[in-house]
Amino acid sequence: MNVHELKNLFAETKECSSEHVNELLDFTKKSYIQNEITILEYRNLVRELELQGAFIPEDQKEISI
């Protein structure tokens, strides 16, 4: 799966398009947790999304520690 396919899946699932790459990052994490994508797909998608500017907000980093 690539980012283009991820955007299409997001649009189909949410019935709207993503407004920011962070939404796609969240959707990717959820898809991985629910075993809808493999670890390899997850890693590749996260890498691509981070190159496009996606990031974990600072307040969420503190929660996960």
Image (tube, helix red, strand yellow):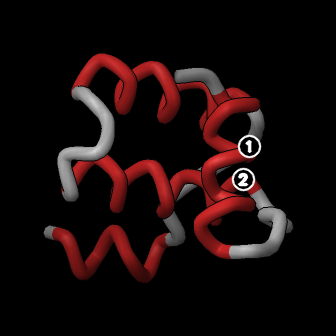
Q: Please state which amino acid type lies under the numbered disc 1.
A: Gly
Q: Specify whether 28 is left or right of 64.
A: right
> Which residue is drawn at the image coordinates 64% and 57% (left, top)?
10
Residue 50 x, y percent position in the rendering: 61, 36
- Residue lying farthest left? 65
Q: Specify whether 47 is left or right of 41.
A: right
- Tell us which disc is closer to us: 2 or 1: 2
> Which residue is drawn at the image coordinates 72% and 46% (left, top)?
7
* For residue 34, above or below residue 1: below
Residue 6 x, y percent position in the rendering: 62, 40
Q: Characterize the local packing of mark 1: few (<14), some (14-19) or many (20 or more) Cα atoms within 10 angstroms.
A: few
Which disc, if any, is residue 53?
A: 1
Tally of numbered discs: 2
Which disc, if any, is residue 21?
A: 2
CA separation in Å, label 2 and label 1? 7 Å
> Which residue is drawn at the image coordinates 83% and 64% (left, top)?
17
Q: Characterize the local packing of mark 2: few (<14), some (14-19) or many (20 or more) Cα atoms within 10 angstroms.
A: some
Under tag 2, what secondary structure? Answer: helix
